[in-house]
Every structure is written in C-alpha cells, then in structure tokens.
Image (cartoon, rainbow, N blue to C red):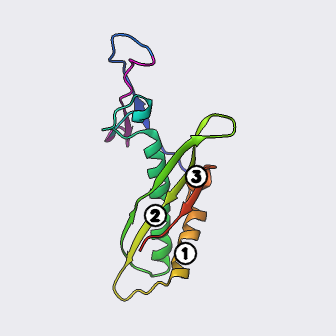
Amino acid sequence: MSEHHATIRWNRTSADYTYDTYNRAHEMTFKDGAVALPASSAPDFKGDAERVNPEEAFVAALSSCHMLTFLAICARKHLTVESYEDAAVGVLDRAPSGKLWMARVTLRPQVRFAAGVSVDAATLADLHHKSHENCFIANSVTTAMTVEPRG
C-alpha cells in the first residue's frame, strides 16, 4: 500500500577498526535527508549516550504508532483528546536461543480528554485495546507489548 524510507549513514572515524575502538555514531535521515536523527548503539554496546539508539527508536516507534492509532479512534468516536503522554519502556533480554531481543515493551500512556468528555476506565481500556490491535508497528513484531494507562 505504501513505502517508507530511511537512510542510515556511517563513516569510520577511528584510526583502527576493532570492536573496542570503532565509532558507533551514525545518522538516520528521513524525508530525503530533510530530517536527521543522530544515532549510535546503546552505551552498553560502546555507543554514545547522547544519541538515540535502535532499541530506543524501536520503543518510540511502538509508542508513537499506538498513540496515533488511539487518537484516530478517539476522533472517529468524537472523544476529543487534549493531551497524550507515554512513558514507554522496552526490555532487551536473551531469547531462549541465547540471542538478544527486545523481549517486551510496556506503554504507560496518560491521556487527558477535553472538558466535558467523560471516559470511564472500561472504555479507556477498550480504546487502548483497539489501538494495540490496529497499530501497524505492533502488528509487525513479535515482542510482547503491554499497555498500562496512567492517571
């Protein structure tokens, strides 16, 4: 139905090239280079903590997709949302095969609806359930994902 593009650019800046010495800093670009995101591996893998790592980007992609799906569902139901914030957490762990993988992601969205919009806990849970079921990114991965609405 549609294509989505990202370009990753890395150049060696170290004098030698060993696991301990090569640089992990790179750039992710989108929109034909119009949007750039400084990236690196996670600090646990000798990366730069000041840059976004793939694990964080993965968690953010799941969180963002869930939020956008949630907002679309609410708009169709005429439930005006004023704000949405998520404190998402992903856990990197070892799979039974021994390989590292993003084992689970927990979304902790806090939604504030417009004055006069009343959404009870059961309806809110249903909105999040439908959002998860319809999120393109969540439908593309095998990582266990949990939604724990806050406040």
Residue matched to label 3: 1
Q: Secondary structure at mark 2?
A: loop
User: Which one is nearer the viewer's eye here, 125 or 5?
Assistant: 125
Q: State the image coordinates of residue 146 (x, y, percent, origin top left).
A: 56, 61
| Labelled disc at residue 108 | 2
In the rendered structure, which segment of residues is drawn in magenta? Answer: 19-36
Q: Is residue 21 magenta?
A: yes
Q: Pointer 3: residues within 10 angstroms few (<14), some, or many (20+)? A: few
User: Which one is nearer the viewer's eye here, 48 or 142?
Assistant: 48
Residue matched to label 1: 125
Q: State the image coordinates of residue 127 (x, y, percent, origin top left).
A: 53, 74
Q: State the image coordinates of residue 44 (x, y, percent, origin top left).
A: 43, 33
Looking at the image, residue 110 lies above or below residue 23? below
- Dominant secondary structure of the magenta stretch? loop
Is residue 84 toward the left or the right of residue 89 in the image? left
Q: Is residue 109 magenta?
A: no
Q: Which residue is drawn at the image coordinates 31% and 41% (left, top)? A: 34
| Lower position in the chain sequence, tag 1 or tag 2 | 2
- The amino acid pointed to by label 1 is Ala
- The amino acid pointed to by label 3 is Met
Nearer the observer, disc 1 or disc 3? 1
User: Which one is nearer the viewer's eye here, 136 or 22?
Assistant: 22
Q: Which residue is drawn at the image coordinates 40% and 72% (left, top)? A: 111
